[in-house]
Image (cartoon, helix red, strand yellow):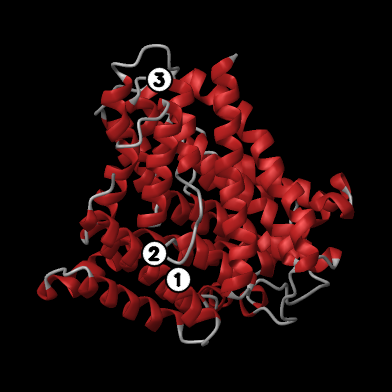
Amino acid sequence: MIDPHSLFLLLTALAAVVALVVLIAVFRLNPFITLLLASLGLALAVHMPAAGVVHSFEVGVGNTLGHIAVVVALGTMLGKMMAESGGSDQIAFTLIRLFGEKRVHWAMMVIALIVGLPAFFEVGFVLLIPIAYTVARRTGKSIVFVALPMVAGISVDHALVPPHPAAMLAATAYHADIGKTIFYALIVGIPTAIVAGPLWTMFIAPRIRLAEENPMAAQFVERDPNRRLPSFSLTLFTILAPVLLMLLGSAADAFTASGSAINQSLHFIGNDDIALLLGVLLSFFTLGRAGGFTRETILRFTNECLAPTATITLLVGAGGGFGRILQDSGVSHAIVGVALGSHMPLLLLAWLIAALLRVATGSSTVAMTTAAGIVAPIAAHAPGVRPELLAVATGAGSVILSHVNDGGFWLVKEYFNMSVVDTIKTWTVLETLISITALLLAMALSLA
């Protein structure tokens, strides 16, 4: 039985989310202003101390932008260098030639599963979106058709597969074998990516109508179609360099002494921000100077590509502020209480707690790590449950029902140039398909 206060918190939070969608989608209010007003309204409605409401929102914005702003800026610069040099076209031509125009959505899923292994969702997204724009332009396909399978592949990696940080933390909390966790995550993750990626895309893409002009895509259009393209191997090396550095950082403890100078150095260069920075600097030589661009031209590229990212970073930050209000207001605590009182199988409980926290906070990483911390002590006294599958189920729950308090929601909306309603139809449903499909497969494996 839910106590009245928890029920009040949950209903108020639900009303705030519904109001957000209606105000943005129906009344066409500015999303940033709407998120700010909804956050303040929710906080006051649940009687948060007025003196701390603004501070809570600002903390949420700051914590979110501390990572996202750097990733979006550096990723956009790298994408700009790929577009101007023709590197994106080279990769697009190669993918189209290997898979054929009718199967480019499968190609984007495959490359996303590879690139997304060590990276946070946002990092993989900004690395691959320039290629998606180019493939869509060259094939005449909708960006939804090309890029939706891409975000499915990245999201599956983000939620399920170590060495991704959140998945790694969940596996560690459950004392799961990392090798077995990766094995089970891939068994579950690959068919899940297929269902939520190419299969869902083939159904929904024809039903989404986008505006002809996409301001973000315009930043990644090659200006000189007659320019000699860089080689496929050089371009691929440039875009994968940050990924390789992140993998190196993730695996540093396996072959170096923890705390040693080499170990700390590898962790440093494997940090998302540092790896992307090194990738951008590398692109200045491999795609810039090697392609005949002057220092002044490269400077112009890096300056002019940043302006369109301002709206995206503001919206992502405001979503983080809304999520922080949900946490500080007690909504997250109420959600955990409801889940723990349900007395259900452990796999389903881990999934449910992560799912509810995801809806409340907007962060799959927070949902996964928090849920693992809650369920781990219970799992220690529940023999018969494979900890590896428990980690997979927790990750599955952490991506369900992405909505307006999730930075990924706004990234997809703005880069795809979709309305809020169309983003819910495509991205939100995709994330929910990943969550439910992965849970069902994990439960099926638990019976084997």
Quadrant that contains the C terminus: top right
User: Residue shown at 62%/40% (left/top)?
Assistant: 114
Residue 176: give its label.
Answer: 3
* Residue 294 visible in the picture: no
- What is the quadrant of residue 173 in the picture? top left
CA distance separating discs 3 and 2: 35 Å
Chain-order first, disc 3 or disc 2:
2
Question: Which tag is nearer the camera, tag 1 or tag 3?
Answer: 1
- The numbered dot on residue 14 is 2
Q: Nearer the viewer, residue 78 or 445?
A: 445
**Residue drawn 66% across and 41% down?**
193
Residue type at numbered disc 2: Leu
Residue 69: image location, x then y, percent: 40, 66
Query: Which circle's residue, 1 or 3, is located before the other in the chain?
Result: 1
Q: Which mark is residue 18?
A: 1
Is 70 drawn above or below residue 375 in the view shown? below
126 lies left or right of 36:
right
